[in-house]
Image (cartoon, rainbow, N blue to C red):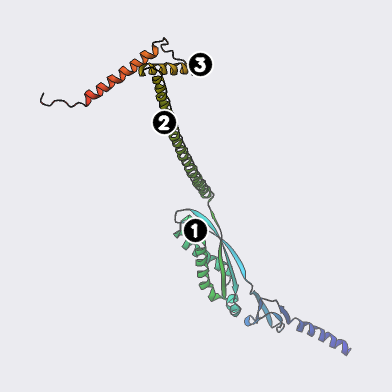
Amino acid sequence: MFQITNLILIIPAIAIIAMGFFIVNQQTTAIVERFGRFLSIRQSGLQFKIPLVDKIAGRVSLKIQQLDVIVETKTKDDVFVQLKISVQFQILREKVYDAFYKLQNPHDQITAYIFDTVRAEVPKMKLDDVFEKKDDIALAIQRELKQAMLNYGYDIVKALVTDIDPDAQVKEAMNRINAAEREKLAAQFEGDAQRILIVERAKAEAESKRLQGMGIADQRREIARGLEESVDVLNKAGINSQEASALIVITQHYDTLQSIGSDTNSNLILLPNNPNAASSMLNDMVTSLVAANKINESSNTPKDESK
């Protein structure tokens, strides 16, 4: 009977004592209170508290946590934009008491500081500057949060601006501007290429004309030399210069007719074709040249001022 009574007393006592043991995980602390008053902070491992007297008020994680906040604000050029801010923070081991007892809702507190900082910095910037200076915005958030939250036991590890999302119409306008800039650039390159092509084509044409002119000059020079040699040969044969010139003219005339007749699509202009045609043509040319020379001489002769 005595043993049964002892067992009845011992088993509950063991159970009560066992209730005093508890485990705290790694990178976690436990807040122990006694009758509602702070008693101690227990670190990771197997811990003991007085059953029915002490209680675990809460557990605080010492790991790095992340809070994502979306803030809508207006830029300097009156464009509404949404910024996604990611803040990484952790509770300092030596300030677990402050982190647990001083703040009712730390996430709301951090969010309020983020809104305040973003809406103070972004309205000073134009939309393009917000994209370019997002790191400056992140540094401003980190600086403000670090100073404000340190008193509550929170250390701000990093603040990041992970997304910038303007209004849909603004994004569409930005895309149109970007497309227009690219089309303008393409048109400039195309214009430059066309200009280079025109310049090179003009240079090639000029060189072709120069070479063609040199060829024509050489051709005429050779023709004149051939005519001179022909006249010399005819003079040696006893034909005077006028008759020789007429013979050469009529020969070239018939050569021309033969050349025109060899092409079926040629347009033919018929000239006088009698035996005296060459001589008459030559006389007309000589007469015209003499008359032109007399006109030039008369125009170049100075007038008598005394008359």
The amino acid pointed to by label 3 is Gly
Distance from label 2 to label 3 (Cα)?
27 Å
Which residue occupies 55% across, 68% down? 110
Location of residue 54 in the rendering, given as x and y in whole percent from the top left corner: 68, 82
Question: How many numbered tags mark residues here?
Answer: 3
Location of residue 230 in the rendering, given as x and y in whole percent from the top left corner: 42, 22
Q: Is residue 264 above or below residue 48?
A: above
The amino acid pointed to by label 2 is Ala
Secondary structure beneath label 2: helix
Residue 217 numbered mark, or none: 2
Q: Is residue 141 above or below residue 250?
A: below
Location of residue 40 in the rendering, given as x and y in whole percent from the top left corner: 64, 83
Would you identify the image quadrant in which residue 82 lies? Answer: bottom right
Write down the residue under mark 1.
130
Which residue occupies 84% across, 88% down? 6
Q: Point out the tag, 2 or 1, that comes first from the N-terminus.
A: 1
Whether residue 221 is visible here, answered yes or no, is yes
Left or right: where 110 falls relative to 297: right
Residue 261 numbered mark, or none: 3
- Residue ranking furthest to the left: 306
Alpha-carbon neighbours of circle 3 within 10 Å: few (<14), some, or many (≥20)?
A: few
Residues tagged 3 and 1 counted as in contact (Cβ below 8 A)? no
Whether residue 105 is visible here, answered yes or no, is no
Which sits in the foreground, 48 or 232? 232
